[in-house]
């Protein structure tokens, strides 16, 4: 995987961020989701790198990036802080503005980045999410059942950490294998990398803190944006899986139109893990969008 990429670790915003760099051209930042790492992009990174300088980073708390102990108010895992990590990473590489694509948790970091730093995000793609506030406020039985981890991981430490550390292998297998496509989309090399990182207790704590922040301080930030009329200004594209929970439980475009001025998108014929389930379809969509 990533044979033409080079791995680096840089200190930004008080922590270390692990990332891969490859290709040449305009800068494109790729941000992964839970419970994964930058490896989710391995099926499309080489093709993207033919046109772009691709930076595939691990979020704080994930992969081989730093995993600080969460503060009592979870503010050091706020998406505002996680977005600042990535803005500073890109600035350290000489990129004052760039394209961004984020899946799942990375999508939440990406749209917060576009809200807080409109001058740096040229275009934005988010994959298989609706805005965090909308998803919590519109929780149904179907959503809570499918996304049980949204409510389990936010329990106070160390309860969820203790249970996950008891069997991280089973958590990974159940979490990514329990979706519509099962384990089929995940190559053995990618799966092994996700498992390696999840077996680190600090990663499990970082994941829990990420979700705790989303159920608390992130909601405060999003409510403030809506009250102030602060919206994403750049061109935004959203894609979600036709077989996924977002399609079943929400109206993604309607929800994003409340938070973004120029947003389009549609469902793709896949489930939640779009970059690994439907890499060709995703490339066919994002390459023209980024090139316009």
Image (cartoon, rainbow, N blue to C red):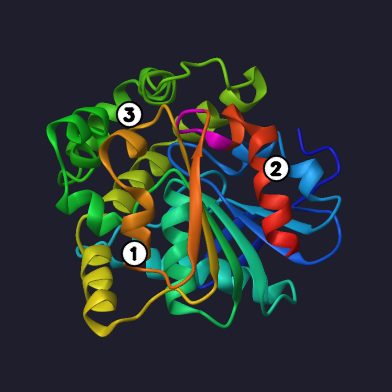
Residue at horizontal 47 percent and vertical 44 percent from the top: 33
Residue 85: x percent and y percent? 52, 68
Question: Height in image: 109 above or below 260?
Answer: above
Q: Which residue matches tag 3?
A: 165
Q: Quadrant of residue 91?
A: bottom right
Mark 2 neighbour class, 10 Å CA radius: few under 14, some 14 to 19, many 20 or more? some
Question: Height in image: 120 above or below 238?
Answer: below
The Cα–Cα distance between marks 3 and 2, rounded to whole angstroms, is 36 Å
Residue range of the region highlighted in magenta in the rendering: 270-274
Disc 3 and disc 2 in contact, CB within 8 angstroms: no
User: Counting residues from the N terminus, which is met first, the one under dot 1 or under dot 3?
Assistant: 1
Residue at horizontal 44 percent and vertical 31 percent from the top: 242
Residue 112: x percent and y percent? 42, 67
The Cα–Cα distance between marks 1 and 3, rounded to whole angstroms, is 23 Å
Q: Which residue matches tag 2?
A: 283
Residue at horizontal 35 percent and vertical 23 percent from the top: 171
- The answer to whether one can see residue 69 in this image is no
Residue 10: x percent and y percent? 65, 64
Mostly what secondary structure, the magenta segment?
loop
Point out which mark residue 145 bears: none
User: Counting residues from the N terminus, which is met first, the one under dot 3 or under dot 2?
Assistant: 3
- Look at discs 1 and 3 and give the one toward the viewer: 1
Point out which mark residue 78 bears: 1
Of residues 63 and 259, the one drawn nearer to the viewer in this rendering:
259
Residue 247: x percent and y percent? 36, 37
């Amino acid at each position: 995987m990533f044979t033409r990429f080079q791995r680096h670790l840089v200190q930004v915003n008080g922590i270390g961020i692990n990332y891969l760099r490859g290709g040449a051209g305009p800068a494109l930042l790729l941000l992964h989701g839970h419970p994964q790492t930058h490896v989710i992009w391995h099926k499309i990174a080489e093709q993207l790198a033919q046109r772009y300088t691709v930076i595939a980073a691990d979020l704080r708390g994930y992969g081989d990036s730093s995993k600080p102990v969460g503060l009592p108010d979870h503010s050091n895992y706020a998406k505002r802080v996680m977005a600042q990590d990535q803005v500073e990473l890109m600035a350290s590489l000489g990129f004052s503005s760039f394209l961004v694509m984020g899946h799942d948790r990375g999508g939440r970091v990406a749209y917060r980045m576009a809200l807080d730093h409109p001058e740096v995000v040229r275009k934005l793609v988010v994959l298989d999410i609706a805005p965090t506030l909308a998803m919590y406020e519109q929780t149904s039985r179907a959503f809570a059942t499918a996304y049980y981890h949204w409510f389990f991981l936010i329990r106070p430490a160390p309860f969820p950490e203790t249970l996950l550390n008891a069997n991280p292998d089973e958590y990974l297998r159940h979490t990514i294998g329990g979706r519509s496509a099962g384990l089929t989309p995940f190559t053995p090399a990618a799966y092994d990398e996700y498992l390696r990182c999840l077996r680190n207790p600090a990663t499990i704590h970082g994941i829990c803190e990420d979700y705790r922040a989303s159920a608390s301080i992130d909601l405060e930030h999003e409510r403030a944006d809506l009250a102030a009329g602060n919206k994403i200004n750049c061109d935004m594209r959203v894609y979600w899986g036709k077989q996924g929970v977002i399609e079943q439980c929400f109206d993604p475009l309607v929800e994003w139109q409340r938070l973004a001025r120029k947003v389009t998108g549609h469902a793709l014929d896949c489930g939640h893990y779009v970059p690994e389930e439907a890499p060709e379809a995703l490339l066919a969509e994002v390459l023209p969008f980024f090139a316009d």
